[in-house]
Amino acid sequence: MNPSTSIDAKEHLANLVFDINKGKMVYFDKIQVTGNTKTRDKVVRRELLVAEGELYSVTALNESRNRLKRTGYFKRSISPRAGGAGMTRST
């Protein structure tokens, strides 16, 4: 992304304009818990701040990842994967 710029040397200002285009709304698809051998899935899921069918949120996903790391149930990293055809919907 390249912003358009204009400089006002007299006022010592630089004006930046970013052109942002909204994409399709993305929703969480099926949430699968794998690698969990220490507890029931419902115990893991209650730490999630996201749910199937909800609008995608990077903030909620990152906080969910941090909450899961603190449980100590998983040895490997926790990462999202792109879902199937039903993952994106236009509104």
Image (spheres, rainbow, N blue to C red):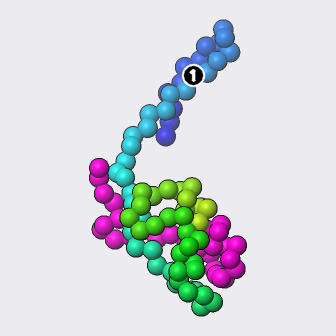
Does the magenta-highlighted stretch encompass residue 68?
A: yes
Q: What residue is pinned by disc 1? A: 15
Instruction: Report the residue that reaches farthest toward the top.
Output: 10
Residue depicted at x 65% and y 66% = 66
Residue depicted at x 39% and y 43% = 22
Q: Is residue 1 left or right of residue 10?
A: left
Category of crowding for the residue at label 1, using alpha-carbon neighbours closer than 10 angstroms: few (below 14), some (14–19), many (at least 20): few
Q: Is residue 41 left or right of residue 75?
A: left
Q: Is residue 69 above or below residue 39?
A: above
Residue 13, by quadrant, is: top right
Amino acid type at circle 1 is: Asn
**Is residue 16 or residue 56 the one in the foreground?**
56
Instruction: Report the residue that reaches farthest toward the bottom.
Output: 37
Residue depicted at x 30% and y 68% = 85
Range shown magenta: 65-91
Residue 28, by quadrant, is: bottom left
Q: Is residue 14 above or below residue 22?
A: above
x, y percent for residue 41: 53, 83
Q: Is residue 80 above or below residue 25?
A: below
